[in-house]
Image (cartoon, rainbow, N blue to C red):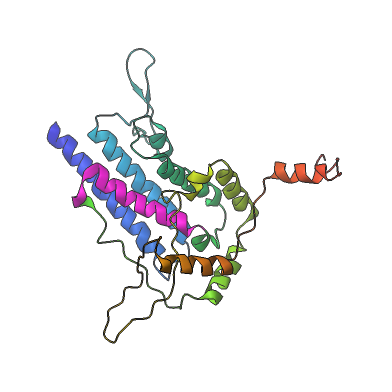
Amino acid sequence: MYRRLFSEKVDLILKSRETALAAVQIYNNPLATFKTEAFIVLFIIAWTYLLHAYYRSEGIDYRCYTIPKKRKRFTRNPDGSIRHWNLTECILKLECPLDKNTSNNLRFLIGLRNQIEHRKASGLDSYLSARYQACALNFNYYLKELFGQRYSLDRNLALSLQFAELDYMQAQVIKDREGMIPKEIHSYIATFDNSLTDDELKSDRFAYRLLFSKVVAKRQGQADRVIEFIDPDSPLAKNISKEYWVREDREKPKFLRKDVLQKVQSAGYVGFGSS
């Protein structure tokens, strides 16, 4: 019985890792045109496998059932197989090992999946990339935290190389693409973000953001990494931050429908929105 439990748990972990790697591979593929859709769907599957493996290791039954007469009656899929907890059900359980900000990230992606399921998602690949990055890093963290360093993806997750230079003009092109995002998805993002506290919105577990600055090698033959990390409290970091905040294109604030109606009506247009 123990060997069977162990082998099924390991099988779930391995499938979880492979699905996560496939999600990152597709997202980093320059030929892929449905990056957001593939990334979200595959990572939802990966996280579901991961949490199923955890619940199995803890002896928690993650099959769906009722107990009408002191005996489990399992809920079945149309093909007759037993239904298991989906990712939403997994993260809502009291036994869920994930921290709140990681759960917020997953809840957002699940809702976004529902929004774009039958709708084109142009522009979202870059617009929400910080949340996708957080999802990948959170996954690797919990993979190691719950099952050990041997399952780590540290060696597999690398920086995606670019054919175009990362400059201000390229950022403008990306912003133009983001303008194609449907208003319904903008509304969903605004509604979800408004349900979180400021600390939750700023959490690296919810959205992982980095500031890039071009670095020139100090001497000939010096090897360079594409990304270098510096102390946030250092004079260099403070100077970069000052320049960044001066040039930053601030995103326009988002308003819910009720907020718009309230502002317009308070301005004297009492009948606005009543029809």
Viewer-nearest residue: 100 or 57 = 100
Estimate the x, y position of residue 12 in percent, counting from the top left: 26, 44
The percent coordinates of residue 16 (x first, y second) are: 29, 48
**Left or right side of 182 for 112:** left
Residue 102 visible: yes
The answer to whether one can see residue 78 in this image is: no
Question: Main SS type for the magenta part?
Answer: helix
Q: Residue at x 24, y 53 (%)?
A: 152
**Magenta segment:** 128-150
The quadrant holding residue 237 is bottom left
Q: Residue furthest front?
A: 235
The answer to whether residue 149 is left or right of residue 203 is left
Q: Is residue 157 above or below residue 207?
A: below
Which residue is pictured at 57% across the width and 70% down the height?
247
Most extreme residue toward the bottom, as rendered? 220
Q: Would residue 47 appear left or right of 15 to someone viewing this image?
A: right
Determine which quarter of the picture holds residue 275.
top right
Q: Quadrant of residue 157?
A: bottom left
**What residue is drawn where x is 20% and y is 44%?**
10
Q: Nearer the viewer, residue 263 or 183?
A: 263
Residue 56 falls left or right of residue 172? left
Q: Is residue 135 magenta?
A: yes
Magenta run includes residue 268: no
Where residue 262 appears, x then y in whole percent? Answer: 76, 41
Q: Residue 112, relative to residue 91: is it above or below?
A: below
Q: Residue 204 at x, y = what percent?
A: 42, 51
Who's the residue at 24% across and 49% down the image?
A: 14
Indicate the quadrant containing the N terminus: top left, top right, bottom left or bottom right: top left
In this rendered view, identify the residue nearer to me: 144 or 228.
228
